[in-house]
Image (tube, rainbow, N blue to C red):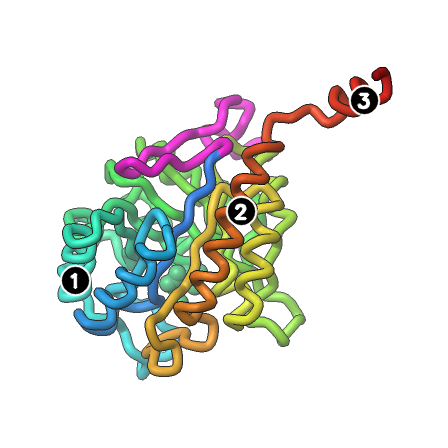
Amino acid sequence: MSKIKLVSRDFKEKDTIINIGDVIVGSNTRIIIAGPCAIESKEQVLAAAQIVRLGGADIFRGGAFKPRTSPYDFQGLKEKGLEYLAEVRSITGMEVITEVLEPSAVPIVEQYVNVLQVGSRNMHNSPLLKAVGRSNKPVVLKRGIAATLEEWLLAAEYILYEGNQQVILCERGIRTFESSTRFTLDLSIVPNLKKLSHLPVIVDPSHATGWHELVSPMAMAALASGANGLMLEVHPNPTEALCDGVQSLHPAEYFDLMYKVKELQKFLCSIDNKKGYKILHRRINN
Ligand code: PEP
Ligand code: MN
């Protein structure tokens, strides 16, 4: 791992903490980013935002520029989508995140959102990494579907090298021989990244599994593995979604998961800094 410098724990021992408005990301905090895969219409995005806020997520997500596998699929509302996101922000007070697909779009996208997302398909796009590295907005950097831990950290290195220290890594599943899920969620990379890097790590169980029924259990597992948060796809009416409906949580599923997540967060906070061996030692000696 000799090529990894700025992102490594050897360079900076303490966890990086990132402030997004009032939301604090990193160390012992856990954040929830939720929203639809794509911004489809003003009605859809406002309905989704009310649901997401009611459930208690910290940040609203929604794609305005969609990197679709097929050119025939819905490509997003583009700038109109950005305007709707800004409206969500002013109506609900939630911070917002969206994906940026190309370097030239960074100055436009950053005017509308609080956080920039570099998607899986672009993790190796060094011109884009450099462009978001020159932005002063935090960046969620998703793992490429076939990227090793080292390649992913080197992609983050590009961003830090350009001056932007506010990078959040997002595990979203990798391509394996297993075809029963959309990708394979690699949860062991969470503690592995934490060992090697000071950057916050979040997990996206929606793209990783591809099935809405699998999102909740893997979301809980992700938090238990030490992740600093989750990115979830939620849609007011998944059966009508223009993109990723099958993996999108129904509102009721989202509310159920958020209840569990809040309870798990309380429990994790209560044990975060506990030294189990000391507690056991005291019990044995009393
Ligand atoms: C997304 O989060 O909207 C997305 C396209 O995810 P990924 O880049 O992980 O495929
Ligand atoms: Mn999606």
Q: Earlier in the sequence, mark 2 or mark 1?
A: 1
- Beta carbon at label 2 within 8 Å of ligand 1: no
The residue wearing badge 2 is 263
Marks 2,1: beta carbons within 8 A: no
Q: Dot 2: within a 10 Å radius of its alpha carbon, few (fewer than 14), some, or many (20 or more) residues?
A: few
Query: In the image, residue 148 lies at what x, y percent?
Result: 58, 50
Image quadrant assignment for residue 130: top left
Q: Secondary structure at mark 3?
A: helix
Query: In the image, residue 129 lies at what x, y percent?
Result: 34, 46
Q: Amino acid at mark 3?
A: Arg
Q: Secondary structure at mark 1?
A: helix
Range of the magenta residues?
Answer: 1-28
Query: In the image, residue 125 lies at what x, y percent?
Result: 37, 53
Nearer to the camera, 75 or 208: 208
Q: Amino acid at mark 2?
A: Glu
The residue wearing badge 3 is 283
The residue located at (31%, 83%) in the rendering is 72
CA gap between label 2 and label 3 equals: 26 Å
Image quadrant assignment for residue 267: top right
Q: Dot 3: within a 10 Å radius of its alpha carbon, few (fewer than 14), some, or many (20 or more) residues?
A: few
The residue wearing badge 1 is 84
Q: Secondary structure at mark 2?
A: helix
Q: Amino acid at mark 1?
A: Tyr
Q: Going by the picture, which residue comes out furthest to the right?
A: 284
The mark lying in front, picked from 3 and 1, is 3
